[in-house]
Amino acid sequence: MKSILNRLYNHERLTKEEAKQVLIDIANDKFNEAHLTSFMTVFMMRPITANELSGFRNALKELAIKVDFSDFNTIDIVGTGGDGKDTFNISTLTSFIVAGTGQKVAKHGNYSVSSQSGSSDMLASFGYHFTNDEAVLKKQLDKANICFLHAPKFHPAMKAVGPTRKALKLKTFFNILGPLVNPSSPKNHMLGTFNLEVARLYNYILQEEKGINYGIVHAIDGYDEISLTNSFKLFTRNDELLITPEDLGLNRVKQSSILGGNSVTEAATIFKTIISGKGTEEQNNVVLTNAAFALKIVDETKSFEFAYEEVKESLFGGKAHQCLQTLINNS
């Protein structure tokens, strides 16, 4: 690691192969916490390159405990986190609303590092038991239309750096990696990024993969999801669009309307309120818009208006809430 760090301090870049090997060595606990902290800090001080991100991703995917969901046409809905906006759990709520429409969701997530409550914190607070047992996860997909893949159960490298990330409480390149390394390799991806540069990196990397559908969203005021606080960018295999809330027939919302509370307990209360169909208009519009775009990623022929009606029925018809209950009961 010392030679790698010296090169990085001299503003050199890693090749794809070097980046892959470093992450494999991290997973094998070859470095101490000081080395890990220094290594992660480099990528907080300058942008990660496409080769470095691809190499790190290849290492994590190679080392991952994989699960085969090829019998299901799944989607993952996940953001990088690290946007510093302290919203409620938009991507997790969106996942359950999408599951309530009948679409299968293989949600990849982790504990929060830089916000109050990540997807793993939320589900754990509801009594969900993390597992990497493929049979259990397939049963959840079958019965609840959704399963949850807790990253440390599948990625030894993420587990190895968990304490260091938690101590730093800052976004690192692992935030960027997480959405790209779902161990089930879903056929559809809705990914959110905290800045436009990362969105373009994702688009570059995912363009190289055949046979998948994807949409990458970034709100231009810094959210890693569609926040409706401002316009957002949407990257797909064929388009790069700038979309305003008004384009969708929706009002803009204030940042204060989508905050997530100051603790996991407060975040859980907000989550339960929204998934029970009792959220505010602003909260509902945000999760429904994200869910509608997720359905459009799976089927690009579907209009936003039609998808929006589908997800409204899921939320207000109690289907999303039922998916949550069924998932917890089968964990």
Image: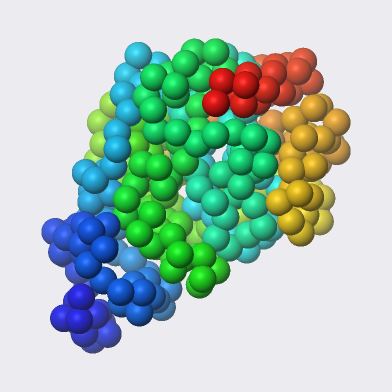
Q: Quadrant of residue 47?
A: bottom left
The image position of residue 11, as x and y in percent, is 26, 82
Q: Residue at x 16, y 81 (%)?
A: 3
Q: Is residue 24 left or right of residue 168?
A: left
Q: Is residue 289 left or right of residue 215?
A: right
Colouring chosen for the image of the structure: rainbow
Q: Is residue 2 left or right of residue 275?
A: left
The image position of residue 5, as x and y in percent, is 24, 80
Q: Is residue 277 left or right of residue 55?
A: right
The image position of residue 168, as x and y in percent, is 50, 72
Name the quadrant of the N terminus: bottom left
Q: Quadrant of residue 133?
A: top left
Q: Residue at x 26, y 36 (%)?
A: 209
Residue 223 or 116: which is nearer the viewer? 116
Q: Is 138 above or below relative to 175?
A: above
Residue 135 or 113: which is nearer the viewer? 135
Is residue 36 visible from the viewing direction of this image? yes
Residue 310 or 124: which is nearer the viewer? 124
Q: Is 100 above or below relative to 244?
A: above
Q: Quadrant of residue 179?
A: top left
